[in-house]
Amino acid sequence: MIEFEEVGHSYDERTVLDGVDLRLAERRVAFVGANGSGKSTLARMINGLVHPSRGRVLVDGVDPVRDGRAVRRRVGFIFTNPDSQIVMPTAGEDVAFSLRRQGLSKAERQRRAADVLAQHGLEGYADHPAHQLSGGQKQLLALCSMLVLEPDVLVCDEPTTLLDLRNKRHFVDVLGGLRQQVVLVTHDLDLLDDFDRVVVLDAGKVVADDQPAAAIPYYRELIK
């Protein structure tokens, strides 16, 4: 359960979130809204990347502001540009790097990295130079580097922005098969038909919150 309790946030004198009150228990939740609507700021509060100016956020009852380390063990985060998350020369090394604090042997880290790569479409790429992967493969690598830590929640901040349509659909299909609760920030409305819930933000407020069949048409009318 992810809870936002009367959450507000300001950058200097500019208010970007105002009175957001949500309880998210569904497995697939999307945040949509125009640029500047506050959706990415709201998503980044889930694992403590941004702290609310007012109100609070809870992840399974834990406040990211008070205990960020505990929340980050539960919550993985995927950014728009996978290059910002890839830190090691090869795909296998990059995933294994995520396990560096787990007290595992090098061989065990390598084995787990190879397993998670194979599970998500990158079998045989453990020794491949990470920055020579395609855009879609890089985003899958960023995903694998989070999944190897076995989080309970995965927050994805516009992860399909830099992908072509084929890779967008593949990435969202992979998300659909995960056991984790997924919170997806996106402009790609056509990818959300199978989601459980869509939250529409406008000028820092929640203006619609429903199943895709109702929330997406509302948003399309809003931005006409």
Image (cartoon, rainbow, N blue to C red):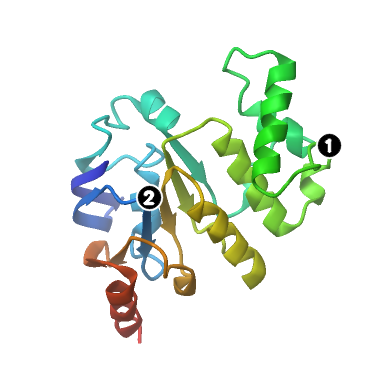
Disc 1 vs disc 2: which is toward the camera?
A: 1
Which quadrant holds residue 92? Answer: top right
Residue 150 visible, this angle: yes
Which of these two is toward me, 157 or 50? Answer: 157
Instruction: Tell me which residue sits at (69%, 40%) in the image.
Output: 117
Looking at the rendered image, the quarter that the N terminus falls into is top left
Q: Residue furthest bottom?
A: 224
Quadrant for residue 20, please give it: bottom left
The vertical placement of 68 against 207, above or below, is above
Q: Which residue: 73% across, 17% down?
A: 106
Residue 86 appears anywhere in the view:
no
Residue type indicated by callout 1: Asp
Which residue is the site of mark 1?
Answer: 127
The residue carrying mark 2 is 43
> Would you call the spot at circle 1 few (<14 residues within 10 Å), some (14-19), or many (20 or more)?
few
Alpha-carbon distance for marks 1 and 2? 33 Å
In this picture, residue 73 sits left or right of residue 160 = left
Residue type at tag 2: Ala
